[in-house]
Amino acid sequence: MVLRPKKELTGMERYIKPGEYREPLEEPEPAPLSGEEIEYEEKQKEKIIKIRERETMPRTEDETITSLERLAPKIVGNIFDRVRFLSERMAELRAAIEDRKRVHAEIMSELAVDVTERKQFLRMLSEIPDKRDFMLDISLLQREKRKENVQFWRDVLELTTELREIIEQHEMESKIAEIFKTVEAKP
């Protein structure tokens, strides 16, 4: 007759009946290490190399840029006041276009400097994750540059359209004012 090998029971299984539940006992504290074991543990710790973990930048969703809604004030007063006011508005719009061009040039130069700095750093890097991060930064800066170009032309188009409308109004109002000047001068 062949005997089956006897299953070795743990301490808890020896004293608990089947179907009866008891909470597991606390684990005993490990015995203190000897001198040789301590040296071995220290050598094992030295062999472990910690690798710096990196997280890539989360992809930012593009914000849709909407132009400011410009509400031109109503022109009130007599015809001569309206002509003067329209000429002031034309000067303001021309100044606004020049300011926008100046701001655009500053932004583009700053972005160009940032891109060249990142490209210089990129040449010095040797780790692939660092290169990937800098390339991502460069592409984000270039994308921002394109968005600024689009916004610049959108703003300039709106300002020039408004300027053109005011110029047309100014011409009409000034012709009417000239007619009234000739009427006033005749009496």
Image (cartoon, rainbow, N blue to C red):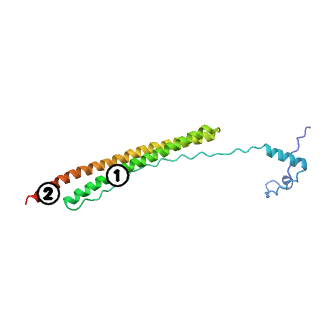
* Residue 78 against residue 116 in the figure, above or below: below
The residue drawn where x is 34% and y is 52% is 95
The residue drawn where x is 46% and y is 47% is 107
Residue pointed to by mark 2 = 181
Side of 58 relative to 126 (left or right) = left
The residue drawn where x is 57% and y is 39% is 120
Q: Which mark is residue 95?
A: 1
Q: Secondary structure at mark 1?
A: helix
Side of 135 relative to 14 (left or right) = left
Side of 41 relative to 137 (left or right) = right
Quadrant including the N terminus: top right
Measuring from the top left, give residue 21's x and y in whole percent: 78, 57
Disc 2 residue crowd, few under 14, some 14–19, many 20+, Cα 10 Å: few
Q: What is the distance, in whole Å, between disc 1 and disc 2 at their CAs?
A: 30 Å
Quadrant including the C terminus: bottom left
Q: Earlier in the sequence, mark 1 or mark 2?
A: 1
Q: Is residue 36 visible?
A: yes
